[in-house]
Amino acid sequence: MNSPHTDYYFCEDLLSPDEKQIRDEVRTWVDRRYLPKAADYFEQGVFPVELIPEMAQMGLLGFKLNEYGGRGKSNVSFGLVCQELERGDSGLRSFVSVINALVIYPIHTFGTDMQKQRWLPELVSGKEIGCFGLTEPEAGSDPQSMRTTAVRNRGGYVLNGRKMWITNGSIADVAVVWAKTEDGEIRGFLVEKGMPGFSARPIERKFSLRASVTSVLNFDNVAVPQDNLLSGARGLKSALMCLNEARYGIAWGCVGAAIACYETALGYAKSRIQFQAPIASFQLVQRKLALMLTEITKAQLLCIRLGRLKDEGRARHTHISMAKMNNASEALKIARSARDILGANGISLGYAPIRHMLNLETVNTYEGTEDIHILAIGRDITGIDAFSCEPRTGQRSEAGSNIYLDLK
């Protein structure tokens, strides 16, 4: 789906002309506007907010939305967008993923008409930014254990708690926040920048996703009016539906990161001379390159089929789990192998693999770790819940029913 170096199975033939055009449009933009400064963004630890209007102009925010100024494109087309953005950097794709899957999607799916009219045009145009607050310091793979609370008052709810590892958090105008009400039900709220008691601070000293805004959100008696409740979102399932959307984009994005690493390694191996020969002529280097390309090809085919199933309304959450689990894991292995082929140069930001490798350490963890996705798939194919640490009784445990990927 890219250059002849990486389209080994002619996956290009599986795409429509419109899908190819969208991919090429984003690829050209990434090559021209992002990659020349990608290493600088990463080294300096900054996200290029000045590029947000350009992404909005291309219709990348609200990409699948048919209303409110959205572009109204397919899931396969969105996947290709994510692939090309992450070929640039995981932070770039994360920004677009969060806006589309974790902010626009829940407002459009669970919000009131007033909420949609207030926020969706602003988010699609890039004039306002959003984030998604689910993960907490003590609740990662087990969000049912969240400690952020929402207590009813006369005008709405009062939120208290903290969210961690929130992409876009400290630059967001609105946060889609999930909190537990007094009756134990998880509900979604739109918390706006400037609300008294609500604060966000960036997480610093990270070695991964450096060209991305990652934040802590704090809620200290934040009064959220009733009008800011996502009335259609009830229970953890609603939050997990949003994450399912995000994981889909991640599965495609990992292909882009893997392609960037492979093509860098291939070009380097052909030009690097050792022992009077290019290292591409050595058997062990060829083995690494062959295995890298094989995994990229498998990931491409997995994504295209998944995208078609999603467009047909037949994709299940475990289908998405399989793609996210496989592609993130294999992309990380490809990045490490590419870094190895580059030798000492592999640790330099003058080459893409070390940057992608560090980013993919995060991508392999967030939106469900590899282990969690494996257990979700295992439960689906065997009918047996392996999440619980208790002796198996043939019944699903409370822990199993609360786990991260339970969308049944």
Image: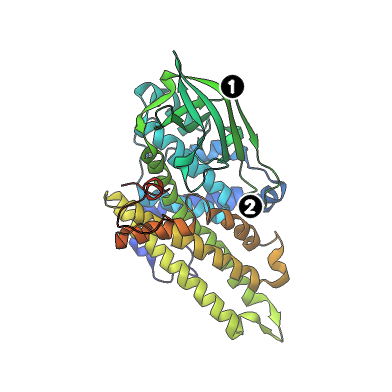
**Please, is residue 320 above or below residue 182 in the view?**
below
Q: Amino acid at mark 1?
A: Gly
Residue lying at the far top in this picture: please name it: 154
Neighbours of disc 2 within 10 Å: few (<14), some (14-19), many (20+): many
Residue 22 visible in image: no
In which quadrant of the rendered image does the N terminus lie? bottom left
Query: Mark on residue 208?
Result: 2
Q: Percent position (x, y) of residue 380? A: 32, 58
Give the side of residue 57 with respect to residue 303, left or right.
Answer: right
**Circle 1 SS class:** loop
Query: Mark on residue 238?
Result: none
Q: CA distance from mark 2 to mark 1?
A: 29 Å
Q: Amino acid at mark 2?
A: Ser
Q: Relative to the observer, which residue lies in front, 260 or 201?
A: 201
**Disc 1 target residue:** 194
Q: Percent position (x, y) of residue 383? A: 29, 59
Q: Relative to the observer, which residue lies in front, 366 or 119?
A: 366
**Please, is residue 88 above or below residue 200 in the view?**
below
